[in-house]
Structure formats: C-alpha cells, structure tokens
Amino acid sequence: MDHIDELLASRGLRLTRQRRQLAGLLFRGGDRHVTAEMLAREARQSGIRVSLATVYNTLHQFTRVDLLRRINVDSARTWFDTNTTVHHHFFNTGSLELTDIPEDRVSVDVLPAPPDGTTIDHVDVVIRVIPR
Amino acid sequence: MDHIDELLASRGLRLTRQRRQLAGLLFRGGDRHVTAEMLAREARQSGIRVSLATVYNTLHQFTRVDLLRRINVDSARTWFDTNTTVHHHFFNTGSLELTDIPEDRVSVDVLPAPPDGTTIDHVDVVIRVIPR
DNA sequence: ATAGCTGCAAATGCTTTGCAAGGCC
DNA sequence: GGCCTTGCAAAGCATTTGCAGCTAT
C-alpha cells in the first residue's frame, strides 16, 4: 500500500486509515467504475470499516484532486471512474454496467459554437446499449 | 387547444384536464427542456392546478408514447425534451441550461463494437460548457 | 360501468449535513 | 495542539407509491 500512500500524499491528502483502504480498493489496478453504494459494499466485504458518509466524502475528495472522474449516465446515482483521461462510455441500461471506450475510437466533430458567454469544458459521449 | 387534443388522442391518452393543460404548456411551439419541478412551477404560475405527482406521471406517460425524451445530463434531476428527434446537447454546468445541437452538426464515428450480448440503443453526446 | 387518472401523504433511495469524538501532522 | 476526518443520525431532495375518490369513454 505504499504507492497508494504516495499517491494520496502527492495530492495533499492526509493518510487516514479509511482513505488508504478505499484508495487500495479503487486503485489496485485496472480501470474501475463505482457508485458510492458499490464501494461501501465492497469495503464491508473486505472487512474495511467505513461509514457510507465517509465513502461519499472520500469519493468527492478524490474527485477534487483528480484521482477520480464523475460520470453522468444514470439519473438515479452518481458513478465515479478511476480512469481520469478523456474517454467515453457504453452504458448498459439493463444491467447498469459501465464500460470504457478509448477516446481514439470515437471521433466527434462539433461544428456549432457553444452558447454565448460559454466555453466548452468537455464532451461526453454515452452509448446506451441494451441486452440483446 | 385542439391540435393538442388530437396529439394526445393519437397516442391513446385520455383527455384529462391536467394532461391537456400540461401538454398545452409543453407543446405550444418551440423545443423545450423541462424538469418536473420547472413544469409544476410554470403550471402553478399559469393558474393550472396540478399536483407534483401528476406532473411526474404525465411526464412519464408522455415519454412512454414518445412525445418526450428523457435526458441524462445532471445526476441531480431528470430533464425532459420536447424534441424527440435524434440530436445532442450543450449543458451549461453553471446555469443548468440545456441547449439543443442539431444532429447533423455533430458526427460521431463509433468504431468499437458494443459489449457482448448488447445492441446499441442510442448515442448521447453532451457538450458540457461553463460560463466564461 | 369501468378502466384509467388524480391528488395527497407517506415512503423510498441517494446524497448531504451537523456535530461530537477521534486521529494525523 | 490544532485542524482535518470520521461516524452516526438526522435532514434534504427528487422521485415513486398506495390508495381513496373522481372522470373520460
């Protein structure tokens, strides 16, 4: 859990037990998509004692320091993605599964200018899929 | 409110007072983006007496018969769009304003196949903009 | 007549907040 | 020590649901 500690420290986060353990789950390798509820359940199953409130706090703190990215696909809950690079998603409306699409596999040509007084922040492409 | 009645009837919906009045607000011309709360407030201000529950019911019924389209841009609330054709959106994260982008102004080339066992339902492109 | 609607209030589900106790630097 | 964190419970929102009374067809 050493590179995890460095990761947290490098973002100016204190090394609390809960933070380190949650980070351990999230960043143990591979890209992950989680909701607060999912992460809390996983933590419980791994024997990590954390309150749901702390899971929420932690997810937001990690998002603030750019260790996570929020994804808006589902109006019922907020998803967080450990892949913070630019990329897009498949969202399975049936199973509620989220899958990454590498950015270079999608090209979006936006011709129209953004509304007056605004600048483009970023482009989200969500391909909604349904079980066949 | 006559073409409204035909519109509702053509979709097999009963002509109740609330339904006709809400449809009147929604489909009086021009594309509109609303949340349940917004529509309820607007109804109240127009002197229409409807409960919030009925506004929700109505929005869902209209969506079911394809008079409206749900949009997922904002994990805090559900947006409905009177434009049911394929098109995309600008979403102003600051002001929470939604603006249409005609479909032909955006081209998306999706190369990767959808996950196993799934078919593409539709593609949503949301361009998040921020006040300058 | 009857299947479908409406409105209210209560319930639900996700998320946030207030605050006292505890832990990191 | 001081400030940040944590955990719990309570509060907050958006949304849904149960159900009794009403209404379009």
Image (cartoon, coloured by chain):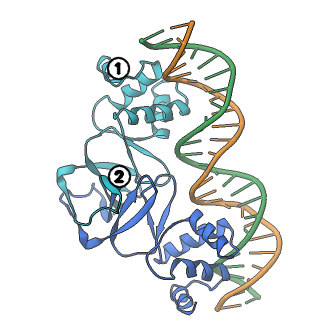
Chain colours: A cyan, B blue, C green, D orange
Label 2: which residue? B132
User: Is residue A74 or residue A93 the one in the foreground?
Assistant: A74
Residue at left offset 62%, top offset 67%: B41
User: Is residue B76 or residue B41 the one in the foreground?
Assistant: B41
Residue at left offset 62%, top offset 81%: B21
The answer to whether residue A27 is above or below residue A111 is above
Residue at left offset 56%, top offset 93%: B2
Circle 1 residues within 10 Å: few <14, some 14–19, many ≥20:
few
The quadrant in which residue B45 appears is: bottom right
Residue at left offset 50%, top offset 60%: B78
User: Is residue A107 or residue A113 the one in the foreground?
Assistant: A113
- Badge nearest the viewer, 2 or 1: 2
Mark 1: secondary structure: helix
Discs 2 and 1 carry the same chain letter: no
The answer to whether residue A131 is above or below residue B104 is above
Instruction: Say what amino acid the circle numbered 2 marks.
Output: Arg
The quadrant in which residue A125 appears is: bottom left
The answer to whether residue A23 is above or below residue D22 is above
Q: Label 1: chain?
A: A
Q: Quadrant of the N terminus of chain B?
A: bottom right
Label 1: which residue? A9
Instruction: Say what amino acid the circle numbered 1 marks.
Output: Ala
How far is disc 2 from disc 1 in space, using C-alphas? Answer: 33 Å
- Residue B38 picture location, percent across and down: 57, 65
- Residue A11 picture location, percent across and down: 34, 25
